[in-house]
Image: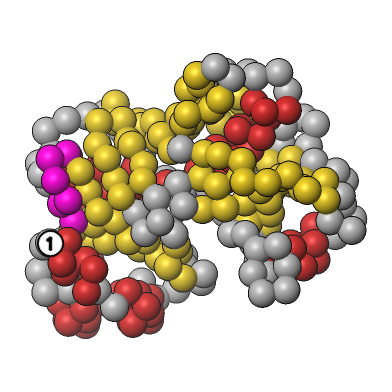
Amino acid sequence: MKLTKIHTAGSDYLICTEPCQDSSALAMQLLNRRVGIGADGLIMLSEERRVELFLPDGKEGLFSSTALIAAAKYIYDTHGGESRVNLSFKDAVYSVRLSTMRGRVLCAWLDMPRIIPRPMEQLKYYHGIRGEVLRACIVHPKVSVYELCGDHAVFFMESCAALRALNIQSVCRRLEEVLFYGENIDLHFMAVAGDNALALRSWRCRIGEMSALGEGAVLSAYAATEYEIVDSHRIMVKSLNGSFCVELYGNEASLCAKCETVFVGEAV
């Protein structure tokens, strides 16, 4: 079985185009970083360019912008250098534009779905026991709630130092227990890191802290425009192990990330 490993903004994915009877079992075998090859996800890519994403625990993954960019990079390398690649994921089609130089992919732009703010819904988190827990976890809480291929909450931190010092595992587990009880929602914590630049830490529900989460980068940039802490439609977002560039067009956005092939090999 031929496998390709691609890094995207700090996340890494194994890509397989060969049919597999049990993709879930294959993912558990290959993605384990101790006894397998190790990666954040296994992408099963069909000839029709349909993407299936499997996680290290064998479960099927949710929408992942970095996985789609990795799949587009693979197609560019193996199918004649297309500058625009359309991919199907869970009955939706996503477009990726590849910026290249001399046949080498420099970065990729993914056209994201429409951002849906939920300003009325976020108000409930400031009152009662929810509000008490929120203020106990974050000193000066500002939370915005959005829908973007799933539900997300963005928290604005007062400084990058506060963001670095955040015990994200303890805080997010507490928030999931009380603030977002019963909700399947990703949590993102961002702070200003310079002119039109943000620092970001992301927590994916039932998985944990993510090395890079493109949806969090997009929503952090969008929230920053709502808070009026940026003055450009192009915003740089630094996540745990990688960086993104976000371009906003009203409630729509494009996400840019670097991607590169790490190795091509075979698994028996």
- Rendered-image quadrant of the C terminus: bottom right
For disc 1, the neighbor class at 10 Å (few under 14, some 14 to 19, many from 20) is some
Residue sitting at x 11%, y 74%: 139
Range of the magenta residues? 191-196
Residue sitting at x 64%, y 26%: 76
Side (left or right) of 254 relative to 25: left
Q: Nearer the viewer, residue 30 or 231?
A: 30
User: Residue 211, position in %: x, y?
Assistant: 44, 59
Side (left or right) of 152 relative to 102: left
Q: Was residue 159 drawn as part of the magenta stretch in this picture? A: no
User: Residue 46, position in %: x, y?
Assistant: 78, 37
Q: Nearer the viewer, residue 13 or 138?
A: 13
Q: Circle 1 sits on which residue?
A: 159
The secondary structure that most of the magenta stretch takes on is strand
Residue sitting at x 55%, y 47%: 7
Residue 77 visible, this angle: yes
User: Residue 265, position in %: x, y?
Assistant: 78, 48
Residue 128 visible, this angle: no
Side (left or right) of 196 relative to 103: left
Which scheme is used to colour this image of the protein?
secondary structure
Residue sitting at x 23%, y 61%: 155
Asked if 145 appears above or below 138 in the picture, the reply is above
Q: Nearer the viewer, residue 258 or 23?
A: 258
Asked if 40 appears above or below 90 in the picture, the reply is below
Q: Was residue 192 drawn as part of the magenta stretch in this picture? A: yes
Asked if 261 appears above or below 99 in the picture, the reply is below
> Toward which corner of the image does residue 245 lie, by quadrant?
top left
Q: Amino acid at mark 1?
A: Ser
State how many labels appear.
1
Q: Secondary structure at mark 1?
A: loop
Q: Nearer the viewer, residue 203 or 89?
A: 203
Asked if 204 appears above or below 34 in the picture, the reply is above
